[in-house]
Image: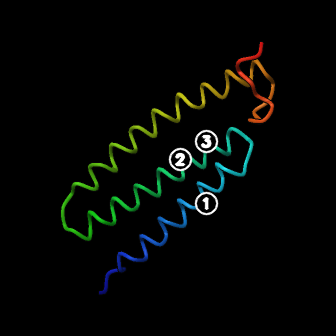
Amino acid sequence: MTSIPIEYYLILSAFMFSVGVTGVLIRRNAIVVFMSIELMLNSANLALVAFSSYLGNSTGQIFAFFVMTVAAAEAAVGLAIIIAIFRNKLTVNLDEINIFKW
């Protein structure tokens, strides 16, 4: 039984990160931007776990676990902020939201 080379994991991680960066830069919907940030965090987790498996230690897996806990907290706080802004401005389009104007 052969294992999958680390290059495949890193190529997939780079592709996922590129899609996430593209989503952040191009899209103007706050929820899509939020999902793109989550995609970038998951691509970093994939790279950490791939390097951890390749090197034979568990340090990368521990870091990936911490990144997942931070991402969960970020998801809860981020969605709460998006909902609060939507209730005030009635839009989630980032071009139309200016929190400094009332």
Quadrant in the rendering for residue 101: top right
What amino acid is labelled 1 in the image? Val
Find disc 2 in the rendering and name its residue: 38
Q: On residue 34, which mark appears?
A: 3
Image location (x, y in percent) of residue 31: 67, 40
How many residues crowd around disc 1 within 10 Å: few (fewer than 14), some, or many (20 or more)? Answer: some
SS state under label 1: helix
Residue topped by disc 1: 19
Contact (CB < 8 A) between labels 3 and 2? yes
Q: Position of residue 94 (x, y in %)?
A: 74, 35
- For badge 3, the amino acid type reads Phe
Q: Nearer the viewer, residue 4 or 22?
A: 22
Work out which quarter of the rendered image holds the C terminus and state it.
Answer: top right
Image-quadrant location for residue 80: top right
> Residue drawn 49% across and 69% down?
12
Which residue is drawn at the image coordinates 74% and 43% (left, top)? 28
Provide the secondary structure element on which disc 2 rests: helix
Decide if residue 51 is on the left or right side of residue 35.
Answer: left
Tally the marks. Answer: 3
